Image (spheres, rainbow, N blue to C red):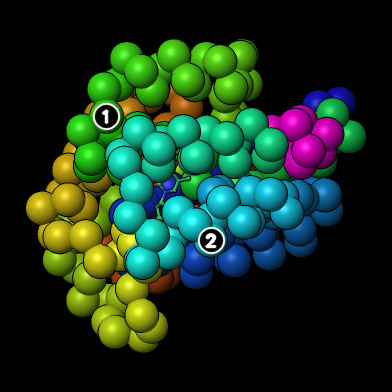
Amino acid sequence: MRGKFITVEGIDGAGKSTHLAWLTAFLQARGIKLCATREPGGTPLGEKLRGLLLDKDQPMHLETETLLMFAARREHIDKVIEPALARGEWVLCDRFTDATFAYQGAGRGVDAGKLATLEQWVQGALQPDLTIVFDLPPAVGRARAGSIKVPDRFERESEAFFERVREGYLQRARSAPQRVRVVDASRGIDAIQAELQTIAESLCR
Ligand code: TMP
């Protein structure tokens, strides 16, 4: 049986990594064979493109950025996502096309119609079975992220940029309510994990 495709999204600082680690452990404990991967990245070529895309010293046109995201995705779908799903594994992917609509579309202003064309070209009928968006105000995310490391090309964007990205995610959620679940990530970890558990259990049924 084909596996399930789950993607996880949110603005930088939403606590995605912590929640992903929890979700991975939860699903594995249920005996699910999991392929945990990420975008941009997930393949040797994709990881090279990630390096360019995140490099704070590598400026690029907003459409170049968009095309590189989709180029990495094409490779990822071909080499990792589709084969894993076909083997019956579940794919848990840290970001996917909703991130392009949120960051390049809402954040940078790339036309949504162009993104939809690229989405159709690169993915065909492939869509996640479930997308979890960890939602919180950018100011809270920024405060939580603190100054742990040198910010990459996206992390150094303004709060106004992340407000637009956040709204982009919420817009995607409104347009696909059967696929996208918005989780309030401004709450404490226990409340978030309890909601995640409910979501994950309904998936395992
Ligand atoms: P990460 O640090 O959460 O792994 O994500 C890397 C960065 O790439 C993050 O700031 C969001 C950005 N990104 C886009 O702008 N568009 C995309 O399509 C994807 C997948 C990520």
User: What SS does tag 1 mark?
Assistant: loop
User: What SS does tag 2 mark?
Assistant: helix
What is the quadrant of the C terminus in the image?
A: top right
**Cα distance in 3D space between marks 1 and 2:** 22 Å
Q: Which residues are magenta?
A: 77-84
Q: Is residue 196 left or right of residue 185?
A: right
Comes first in the chain, label 1 or label 2: 2
Q: Is residue 173 above or below residue 34?
A: above
What is the quadrant of the N terminus in the image?
A: top right
- The residue where tag 2 is placed is 51
Give amino acid for label 1. Val
Residue 130: quarter of image: top right
Q: Is residue 51 left or right of residue 91?
A: left
Residue at the location (49% across, 40% down)?
69
Residue at the location (47% across, 20% down)?
118
Residue at the location (45% across, 54% down)?
53
Q: Residue 36 or 59: which is nearer the viewer?
A: 59
Q: Residue furthest bottom?
A: 148
Where residue 161 appears, x then y in whole percent?
17, 50
Q: Is residue 91 magenta?
A: no
Where residue 22 appears, x then y in whole percent?
58, 65
Q: Is residue 79 magenta?
A: yes
- The residue where tag 1 is placed is 110
* Numbered-mark total: 2
Asked if disc 1 and disc 2 are in contact, CB closer than 8 Å, the reply is no
* Residue 113 visible, this angle: yes
Where residue 122 appears, x then y in whole percent?
58, 22
Q: Residues within 10 Å of mark 1 (few under 14, many from 20)?
A: some
Where residue 194 appears, x then y in whole percent?
46, 59
Magenta span: chief secondary structure: helix
